[in-house]
Image (cartoon, grey):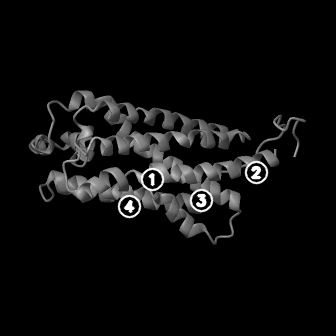
Amino acid sequence: MTTSSAGVGFEHLAPQRALSQPAKSAFKTWTLTWIASTLAVMVLFYVGVLDFVNSSRASMYLISVWLNGWIVVWFLRRYSGQQKEDLYHDLLVVWMVSYAITNIQWEIPWVIFSPFVFENIVTLEDLVAQTDYMREKPWHLYYWVLSTFGALDLRTVNHNGTFYALEWYAFVNLATTFYFFHLNNKRSPYRYLVVVLGCGEPIATTFIFTFSEVFDGFVNMPGNIWDTLLALVWTQYQYFVFPMIFGAIGCKLLVHDWRHS
């Protein structure tokens, strides 16, 4: 290890790390399964087999399961003989990419378009009333994509200010993800510092997202108890628990880099 006397002036590159091919293949299969399942639900809605509420529920359950992809990779790779730090890197990358995909697939389009797409939507009945429009033409399914979470949480469609402000964090998360990969490609000893410093943001935003509705008495929850749990627990715990886990893993990897730089 070569450092300055203060212990921070690194002269060598950090160890080379990239997502391993087995982890990449497992995550690709996991993700393609989720995409195919979600498209099947969308088609079933479009042709009238599923109504709006049930298709939305199915879509939300699917994404809540898919977000656990790093656990699948860990389960498949835990006894592979891979170096511990490389396995940790694989798990971290799978989680970061999963999180970034949700930003690109829903949160950022919703932030950009929801102020113009959703007009005079106050109740679940108002949202369900848009079913004919969504089924009118295949490209009208953009409305289904943007509004599925509204079947569980009306803050998605009633221009709730707190909800809207919190979803802007998607841009920050996407930027920090790209920056992490930039530093990783440069083999910077500071790459995992991005993870450590950023892990608190999703925890705080998820806490506000969930408990602002709890403290408001669930006024925006139009469904039953299971829908409320899906909206506030099963689709949210990943953003609360996983950043804690990867913040700790990031600390271990950061220290390992500094000791070998």
Q: Nearer the viewer, residue 186 or 74?
A: 74
* Residue 41 spot, x, y in % from top left: 24, 57
Q: Residue at x 19, y 44 (%)?
A: 138
SS for tag 3? Answer: helix
**Tag 2 or tag 4, which sits nearer the N-term?**
4
Q: Which residue is mark 1?
A: 238
- Quarter of the image for residue 226 reads bottom left
Q: Residue furthest bottom?
A: 79
SS for tag 4? Answer: helix
**How far apart in space, not on screen, are marks 4 and 2 (Cα)?**
35 Å
The amino acid pointed to by label 2 is His
- Quarter of the image for residue 83 reads bottom right
Q: Residue at x 63, y 53 (%)?
A: 89
* Residue 211 spot, x, y in % from top left: 36, 44
Q: Is residue 205 visible?
A: yes
> Is the residue under label 2 in contact with that under label 4 (CB below 8 Å)?
no
Q: Which residue is mark 2?
A: 256
Front label number (1 vs 2): 1
Q: Which residue is mark 4?
A: 33
The amino acid pointed to by label 1 is Gln
